[in-house]
Structures are given as structure tokens and as C-alpha cells.
Amino acid sequence: MSIRAQYISLLKQLVALPSVSAKEAYLPETAQLIADAFRTLGAKVTYDDSYFAPIVLAQFTTNNPHASTIVIYNHYDVQPAEPLNLWQSDPWTLTSRDGKLYGRGVDDDKGNLTARLAAVAEYLSENNNELPINITFIVEGSEETASRHLQDYLAKYHDILKADLIIWESGGKNDQDVIEIFGGNKGIVTFDFSVTTANNDLHSSLAATANSAALRLSQAIASLFDHDGNIVVPHFYDDVLSPNEREKQLVQSLPLTRESFITQHGLTTPLHSDLHDADLKATLYFQPTLNIEGITSGYTGPGVKTIMPATATAKLESRLVPNMLPDTTLQHIKKHLQAQGFSDIIVTKTLGQPGYRSDMSDPEITRVIAVAAKYYNVLPVVIPTSPGTGPMAIMHDALQAPIASLGIGYAHTRDHAPNENVRLVDYNQHIDVIKSLIASYRV
Ligand SMILES: [Zn+2]
């Protein structure tokens, strides 16, 4: 069996383990399988199972004391596969059709991991078992649940971890089939609002005398915005890090138009950028958000039920740009509610993670861009910050190295959704690119 085929078969085994971190399922089993694969390849493996999702550290070292170190970050946990009826093949069975591999985690993130393992394995076998750099894999199992232990973990292993460059878990090609390289991502703070306005749901005739919890909650949420959707929470934007000239330029050159954006998402409400005469790309990449994920209150079944709901809850989130801190942002929101007379709204933080942007002119980042440009024979689309979220800030703060994100995905990879898939051609290209990146350190 070829090396690449061996790692596809590892991918098959990994996909067969439903390692959903939200359900805390199959995490040690999956981590063990990965640790064994690293050991087989000759890495020094440190397996830490003091967390609910064990973290696998695998170090490939050279004899050269001056060699650089690349840290490769991946995760083995996945999102739930539901709704199952929308999958064309079993999510937990790696299935190959039409040049694509299907299965939960095939892109996010098990396939990226096995592609990178295959790259190191092939490089070693083609180069007398020697690497020109040290390569450290950090593979965690709680990425889909906010990397709950990563910060603690990185502090614990601080003395044995160093990095000149961090390769992020995933990435891929855009809808024009050009490879993208990300250097950052937004942070996030998620929180619940809840309010109780009576002992129990009341007869709705009493609406003549008091407000329901549903109205109270709606008013509190509405107070966060003005009529155009501007966030009016005082100090919300205070810490926003403005992009530098290169970052602005990079985002301006992204192939995104207002019209294609509206069509792609079937948007029927005006864009914020149109309401405020702002630039869509700059808003998308460099501005924080405040969003309602869902609202629950009262009776929503068939027919009529004439009640005043006594309780109402909402789930909200704010995507943060670099420099904004989750707890500080939430404090601003709490203070605003108090000032607006909504001290009865209980605010509970659920998750938080700061955002991060790399300096895209760092020589290690330009190395990655140059290697990808040469291999794909096209200039990659370089994006300073992804609008999505991940623990980049945690990793950067611990290792003080720039981060580049590229991977095996494409525009229809469907991460987190039914029929998650990757194209074999992209998968194999990523193996080649990682090998070229390793080779670029040869002196
Ligand atoms: Zn991921």
C-alpha cells in the first residue's frame, strides 16, 4: 500500500469514530488512534489525558540545533452529524464518490490531519528519514467546543514548545478554485439573556396590567441597536484594532462583490454597509458583530393559547476583532442593560475566545505564500483574518509565532453540515504543498 493510501485508511478509521466533543463521545479512542499513528512514524508522543478530550503532542526533531520549528495545529473532534436524513451516505463511513471523500470530519478536521501526516511520512521516506526542521503536531479534541483546555495545556508544556511558524488546522480553495491563506480569525463571546416576569404564565387579560417576559426580553435586545442596526452599546468599539495598510489592501483585493454576496445568501434585508455607506469587505473582515442566535418564549404550537409568557430566554453572540476581549465586551453589554433599566435581564456567559491577526508580511508567512504560489502556479488569495472563529489568539500568545491557515477544503466542503466532503485532488495537493514547505527549509 502506498503511503498516501495508508493515511486514507487511517482517515477511514478516524471517520468511523463519532468523536463529537459536544457529546464527549469517542474522544480518548480517537486520540489513542492518532497517538499510535505518530508513534509508528517515529515521533516522540506526549499523550495527556488529564482533560476530557486528551491532547496529543507529537514531535519530530532534527539533529540540527539551529533548525526552525513548525507547529501544526489540528483537532480530532467533530460537530454532530444530525440531521442524518440529509446525508447521502453514512456520516461515519468514509465514502468515495465522484473524486470526492464524504464523511463527518473529512475536512474539519480529520482529513487535514491525515494529509499532513502523509506529507511528513512521504518526506521522511524520500529523504533518508531526515527532516530539515522540527515539526510539532498539537492535536486537540475540544476545538468544536471552544478549545476549553488549550490555554491551560499550552502553559503546562510551555518549556518544551517553541515555534517559528504555526500551520493552522484547515483552509482551502475559494469559489473560483484559488487557494486561500488566512492569517487570523475573529474571536467570540456567546451569552444568554433570560428574564422572569411572573410566578408562572399568566392569563393574557392581565396584559392590561404588566409586560410579558417575551416583550421585556425583546425590548432589552432591541436596546442594543438603533433602527439601522448599529450597535449602540457604549464602549463596544473602544478596543477594535484598526487594520494596517497591507491588511486593508489584502481584503480589498478579495474577489467578493456586493451583488454576488447578496445572491449567494439570498439576502432580503439591506446590508449594513449599504445603510452606512461603508465598504462591505472591510465591514465583514474588520468589524465586530452582535447577533441573536435564537429566542425562546411562550406558546408557539398550533392554534391559539392566550397567555402572557412568564419567562423568556435568548442566545446571543458577539464576534470579536483582535484586541477586543470576551469578558470586557460582555461587561459593556451588561452595563448598557443596567443603564437602560434592564437590570432584571440575567446575562450568562457561555463561551469566550479572543480574536487574532498575523502580520502577513512576516517572513515565515511570506514563505508559506511563496511555496503555495509556486506549487499552485497562481497567487494565493491572502486574507489577514477569517470572519470565522478559532483559538488562534491562544496559540499565538503561547508560542509567539505567526499563523498561516491553508488546507484541503474547497467552496462546497460543507463543514459542520450534512455531506461534508473534500475533493481528492485538493487533498493530494495539500500533501504536496506541505512537503514543499518542509523542503523550503533545506539549506
Ligand atoms: Zn476545525
Image (cartoon, grey):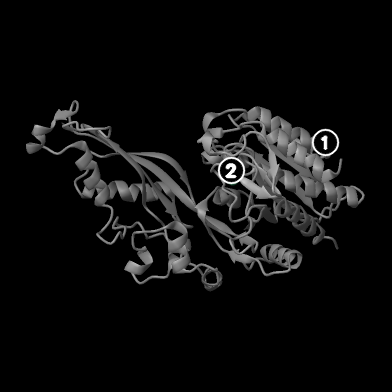
Foreground mark, 2 or 1?
2
Q: Residue furthest right?
A: 128
**Can you see residue 311?**
yes
Question: Looking at the rendered structure, which numbered label has been put on residue 135?
Answer: none
Which is more toward the observer, 293 or 262? 262
Asked if disc 2 and disc 1 are in contact, CB closer than 8 Å, the reply is no
Give the side of residue 269 with respect to residue 385, left or right: left
Of the 4 image quadrants, the one containing the N terminus is top right
Q: Which tag, 2 or 1, sits closer to the chain's start?
A: 1
Residue 262 sits in quarter: bottom left
Which is more toward the observer, 307 or 286? 307
10 Å neighbourhood of mark 1: few (<14), some, or many (≥20)? few
243 shown above or below 398: below
Mark 1 vs ligand 1: CB below 8 Å: no
**In x, y percent, where is residue 383?**
57, 63
Q: Write down the residue under mark 2.
A: 419
Ligand 1: image quarter: top right
**In x, y percent, where is residue 90?**
62, 34
Of the 4 image quadrants, the one containing the C terminus is bottom right
**In x, y percent, where is residue 331?**
34, 47
Give the side of residue 32 with respect to residue 42, left or right: left
Which is more toward the observer, 421 or 397? 421
Amino acid type of the residue that numbered disc 2 sits on in the rendered structure: Asn
Question: Looking at the rendered structure, which numbered label has been put on residue 40?
Answer: 1
Residue 275 sits in quarter: bottom left
| Residue at left offset 82%, top offset 36% | 40
| Residue at left offset 18%, top offset 26% | 199
Inter-mark Cα distance, 2 to 1: 31 Å
363 shown above or below 113: below
10 Å neighbourhood of mark 2: few (<14), some, or many (≥20)? many
**Can you see residue 147?**
no
